[in-house]
Image (cartoon, rainbow, N blue to C red):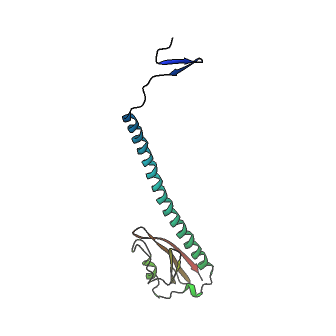
Amino acid sequence: MLSSRFLKIRGLAVFSGNAGMSLIELMVAILIFSIGALAVLTMTSGSFQTNSHSEAIDGATNLGRSKMDLLMSLAYDDASLLDVTADGVAGLADNHPATSPLGDPLRADFSETSGRYQVLWNVANNAPVNGAKRIAVIVIWPWKSGMKQVVFQSVKAE
């Protein structure tokens, strides 16, 4: 036989007590749900930032690769492959992350802007050997409170 707290309706036992959730139980349940929701929001925010940074690196990499492919397809004596600053390998050194965090647009042989990216390239004649040109393509863009860069280097033979 069922206790007095249950009613038997059409063969089913149904709870008939007046007890329910107290206000404290409800507040604890809401607190637990809120903590979980905040954790999910924090992860979502972090993933948006990571995706945005990845997208920026992807865009810079594609832009730099396209520019390097274009420069490598040009004739050896094309105007876009001249060392116009006449600084040779020194013009490439300022674009190396070990010596400087960014390519210097003032020392670049050529520069162009594409959206938020600035594409620079330097050429060094007879480097690393006579009859060859070392080409460095640097893509820089603003990120948060600083600048980011990707660097491509290649050698074009005469």
Residue 27 percent location from the top left of the image:
38, 38
Note whether 79 is above or below 32 in the view shown. below
Question: Which residue is drawn at the image coordinates 43% and 42% (left, top)?
Answer: 33
Question: Which residue is drawn at the image coordinates 39% and 32% (left, top)?
Answer: 22
Q: Nearer the viewer, residue 56 or 35?
A: 35
Residue 9 percent location from the top left of the image:
57, 19
Residue 53 percent location from the top left of the image:
48, 63
Note whether 142 is above or below 2 in the view shown. below
Residue 38 percent location from the top left of the image:
42, 48
Total residue callouts: 0
Outermost residue toward the left in this view: 24
Q: Nearer the viewer, residue 113 or 94?
A: 113
Q: Nearer the viewer, residue 122 or 37?
A: 37
Outermost residue toward the top in this view: 1
Q: Quadrant of the C terminus?
A: bottom right
Question: Which residue is drawn at the image coordinates 41% and 38% (left, top)?
Answer: 29
Left or right: 9, with 90 as reference point:
right
Q: Nearer the viewer, residue 39 or 53?
A: 39
